[in-house]
Image (cartoon, rainbow, N blue to C red):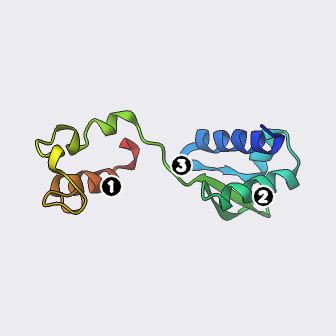
Amino acid sequence: MSRRDDLEEQALKIIIDKGSDGILQSAMWRELKASSREGSRISLRLEAKNLIKRERELSKGRWTYRIFIKKRLIAIDSLLEIPCMFCDYTYRCELDGEISPATCVPLTKWLFSNEENPETS
């Protein structure tokens, strides 16, 4: 693995660990022991890969970016609640079939309930 890929992986771990509060871009590159230029480039690459989002913020009189993870990790416990796990019709469920995930009411309710309670997923 190249140093660049290694730094991106480390940066992503730092951002994930910060959770919903995010981290200032300058704090991230300090934790990585990288230069500000390298830190900015890492952030831009992660943003281009659609892994993070950056929001402009004024901190200590200077403009910077707060970085947030874009994709949430799913807790294994939330998977146990998927209605498909205990559905009597799973063997007949097909995308274009009479029974379909696209028209399944229990599955739709489960998806919307997880969207409203993101900390459980």
> Mark 3 or mark 1, which has the lower sequence index?
3
Density class for disc 1 (Cα within 10 Å; few <14, some 14-19, many ≥20) is: few
> For residue 53, what is the image quadrant?
bottom right
> Mark 3 or mark 2, which has the lower sequence index?
3
Q: Which residue is mark 1?
A: 116
Quadrant for the C terminus, please: top left
Which circle marks residue 60 in the picture? 2
Q: Secondary structure at mark 1?
A: helix
Q: CA distance from mark 3 to mark 2?
A: 21 Å
Q: CA distance from mark 3 to mark 1?
A: 15 Å
Which circle marks residue 69 in the picture? none
Q: From the viewer's perspective, tell me whether residue 70 is left or right of residue 27.
A: left
Viewer-closest of 10 and 91: 91
Viewer-closest of 110 and 20: 110
At x 17%, y 52%, the residue is: 106
The correct choice, above or below, for 77 with respect to 65 in the image is above
**Which amino acid, by three-letter code, is at mark 3?**
Ser
**Which amino acid, by three-letter code, is at mark 2?**
Lys
Viewer-closest of 49 and 42: 49
In the image, residue 75 lies at what x, y percent?
40, 37
Quadrant for the N terminus, please: top right
The correct choice, above or below, for 97 with respect to 87 in the image is below
Quick check: marks 3 and 2 in contact, CB under 8 Å?
no
Density class for disc 3 (Cα within 10 Å; few <14, some 14-19, many ≥20) is: few
In the image, residue 82 lies at what x, y percent?
25, 43
Q: Which residue is mark 3?
A: 20
